[in-house]
């Protein structure tokens, strides 16, 4: 199938080209993000392949549907950036990669916990400058601490297994508790109890209208003073201004982010020679107890191999009507 691949980075091209011989799709790689302005690049393409910061609102989908496009293949698990109602109205099929490596994201979340706790980001710089002093680097034992996990799907469950290995007590909130987590000893509680009892809170639920700004001023007020907050899920789960206020007051003791509400204008690009215009993001960078990575939770070789294989498999299944197609329909909005 003629497939327009947007937001192409060299690694996307490498893994998609390696997986394509079994499928034989005609892949056209475009570096820009998909927007209303770049949508005409896809005019002749039946499939459009996109990532998390591509724009898939009604006007863009309308423009794609006016051309040859029939299927939108997400190279991601999350689909919060797609107007699914518009896709249905325009008869566009949306497919995604429901699971590629929950370990990749869960291990990254655990990495943020360890780095923040033991201040590895600061220790790295100190030692390079010949400063071997330990003051300011005091951490705490993870063993015996309480970790609250919001969302225990594939990634949340993998994170629970890792933290269980450290000897943490595990609490969770999820409207659909996981039997696997219950067997691991995870205790399901209400959100308010989770906020009140957790030393570390990790977000692993999807972003949707119910979870938008789940972590705001009211939630922070209920948390333990000095809590560690980890978000590798989607930026919109956190009200960034409220979190900045919490960091300034000391209510939040540590913040680890792999995602940010306004990341579309920042992440995945080298902006090191540019002036950052997002003052909220720049404020976050000034805190010594904040560690931010640029949406790299998914970024392991195993995950990229599976993303490429599932994405091309989805397009093949759409084209041939056979094989497994991971469609996202409007029913997920219910
Ligand atoms: P999943 O669908 O397996 O699990 C999501 C879980 O969240 C489900 O158990 C669901 O019942 C639960 N949930 C739904 N609404 C909730 C609510 N209001 N409160 C608490 N829990 C709720 O998804 P998976 O694969 O575990 O991914 C989780 C999220 O991680 C994705 O939605 C995506 O946003 C993010 N992600 C981030 C990546 C990164 O590179 N940083 C890569 C892949 C996913």
Image (spheres, rainbow, N blue to C red):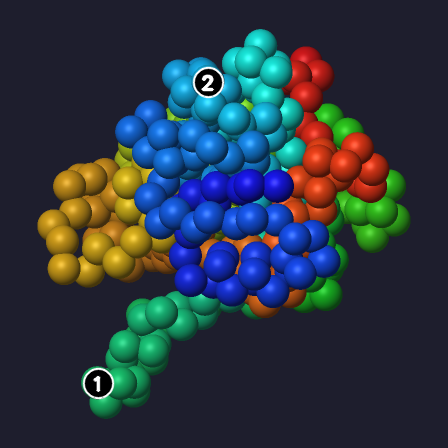
Q: Which residue is mark 2?
A: 66
Name the residue: 21% across, 85% down: 129
Q: Vertical placement of 57 versus 207: above or below?
A: above
Q: Quadrant of the N terminus?
A: top right
Instruction: Please give the residue where the numbered disc 1 appears in the rendered image.
Output: 129
Circle 2 SS class: helix
Ranked by sequence position, the earlier of labels 2 and 1 is 2
Q: Where's the C terminus, which quadrant?
A: top right
Asked whether the viewer can see residue 101, the reply is no
In front of the other: 199 or 58? 58
Residue 9 versus residue 314 in the image, above or below: below
Classify residue 196 as left or right of residue 156.
left
Answer few, some or many: residues within 10 Å of disc 1's Cα (few below 14, many 20 plus, some between 14 and 19).
few
- Expressed as whole percent of the image width and height from the top left, the position of residue 286 reads 22, 53
Q: Position of residue 187 (x, y in %)?
A: 77, 41
Q: Kindly give the residue lying farthest to the bottom in the view shown.
A: 130
Q: Quadrant of residue 265?
A: top left
Look at 41% across and 57% down and name the residue there.
9
Q: Neighbour class for label 2 at 10 Å: few (<14), some, many (≥20)?
A: few
Query: Which residue is pictured at 60% across the width and 30% down the height?
Result: 71
The kind of secondary structure element at disc 1 is: loop
Q: Residue 185: x, y in percent?
A: 82, 50
């Amino acid at each position: 199938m003629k497939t327009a691949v947007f937001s192409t980075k060299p690694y996307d091209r490498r893994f998609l080209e390696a997986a394509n011989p079994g499928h034989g799709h005609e892949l056209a790689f475009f570096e820009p993000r998909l927007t209303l302005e770049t949508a005409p690049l896809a005019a002749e393409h039946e499939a459009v392949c996109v990532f998390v910061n591509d724009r898939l609102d009604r006007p863009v989908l309308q423009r794609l549907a006016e051309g040859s496009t029939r299927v939108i293949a997400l190279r991601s698990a999350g689909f919060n950036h797609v107007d699914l109602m518009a896709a249905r109205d325009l008869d566009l099929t949306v497919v995604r990669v429901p699971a590629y490596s929950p370990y990749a994201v869960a291990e990254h979340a655990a990495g943020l916990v360890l780095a923040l706790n033991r201040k590895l980001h600061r220790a790295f710089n100190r030692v390079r400058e010949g400063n071997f002093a330990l003051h300011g680097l005091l951490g705490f034992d993870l063993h015996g601490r309480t970790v609250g996990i919001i969302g225990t799907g594939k990634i949340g469950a993998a994170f629970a297994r890792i933290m269980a290995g450290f000897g943490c007590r595990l609490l969770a909130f999820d409207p659909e508790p996981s039997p696997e987590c219950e067997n691991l000893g995870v205790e399901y509680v209400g959100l308010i109890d989770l906020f009140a009892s957790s030393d570390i809170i990790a977000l692993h639920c999807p972003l949707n209208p119910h979870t938008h700004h789940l972590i705001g001023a009211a939630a922070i007020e209920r948390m333990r003073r000095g809590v560690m907050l980890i978000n590798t899920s989607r930026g919109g789960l956190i009200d960034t201004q409220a979190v900045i206020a919490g960091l300034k007051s000391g209510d939040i003791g540590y913040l680890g982010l792999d995602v940010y509400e306004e990341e579309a204008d920042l992440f995945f690009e080298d902006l090191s020679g540019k002036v950052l215009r997002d003052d909220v993001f720049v404020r976050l960078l000034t805190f010594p107890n904040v560690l931010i990575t640029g949406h790299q939770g998914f970024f392991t070789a195993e995950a990229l191999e599976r993303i490429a294989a599932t994405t091309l498999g989805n397009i093949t299944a759409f084209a041939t009507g056979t094989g497994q197609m991971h469609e996202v329909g409007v029913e997920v909005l219910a």
